[in-house]
Amino acid sequence: MTIIKTALSVKENKAIGFRWVYVAAPVGVLLIAVVIALVFYWKLPQEVAYRFSRGVAVNQATRGAVLVWVLGLQLAFVLFSLAITAFITMGARRMMLTETPMLRMLLAIIGNILGLPQIIIAYAMTDIFIYNIYGKTLPSLLAFTILVMLAGGIVLAVYFTRALTQSKKLKKENSSGSESDVRK
């Protein structure tokens, strides 16, 4: 009898499920990196400089090796993001949490946060390609990394402020006797 009640309560409430929007940023950055690699790969020399010191190439590798490393890192981040999101989604389902906008937003943040280092890797890949083809470099990777991390921090701060505001609103409404839930 208890199993039937549990199964019915899960069906009554919309159970949390995996959505591709939870990993849209990592998958999107991977696709963009693949397009960039396809555009530049055939223009690259056989030996590609990939590490620099004061604007001078220090280390080189074959263009295939560089491509495998860069796209391999991108793919690893996507798989890691998928694994984390799937793990958390399964845990939420086991705890019989209902799907709310707040929970969807938190899952989207968790799954998409790995897009930030992917953007930095894609930038470094593009810089390597441009240096080896045209002999020019993009603006500093360090400066770009700081900008990306600051932008990511601002987005996280906005989402956490919003969550805190909704939490305080829920606490205030519940203490006044209201049954409404701001998460829905």
Image (cartoon, rainbow, N blue to C red):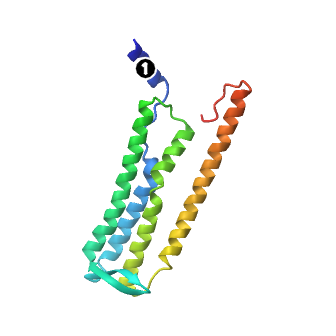
Indicate the quadrant where residue 178 lies: top right
Residue 152: x %, y % from top left = 55, 60
Residue 42: x %, y % from top left = 29, 78
Residue at 60% in and 59% down: 154
Marker count (numbered): 1
The disc labelled 1 sits on which kind of residue? Thr
Residue at 30% in and 68% down: 69
- Tell whether 172 sits left or right of 122: right
Local crowd size for mark 1, using a 10 Å CA cut-off: few (<14), some (14–19), many (≥20): few
The N terminus: image quadrant: top left
| Front-most of residues 43 and 5 | 5
Residue 145: x %, y % from top left = 50, 69
On screen, residue 153 above or below 64: above
On screen, residue 8 above or below 118: above
Residue at 38% in and 66% down: 33
The residue singled out by tag 1 in the image is: 6
On screen, residue 116 above or below 133: above
Residue at 68% in and 43% down: 165
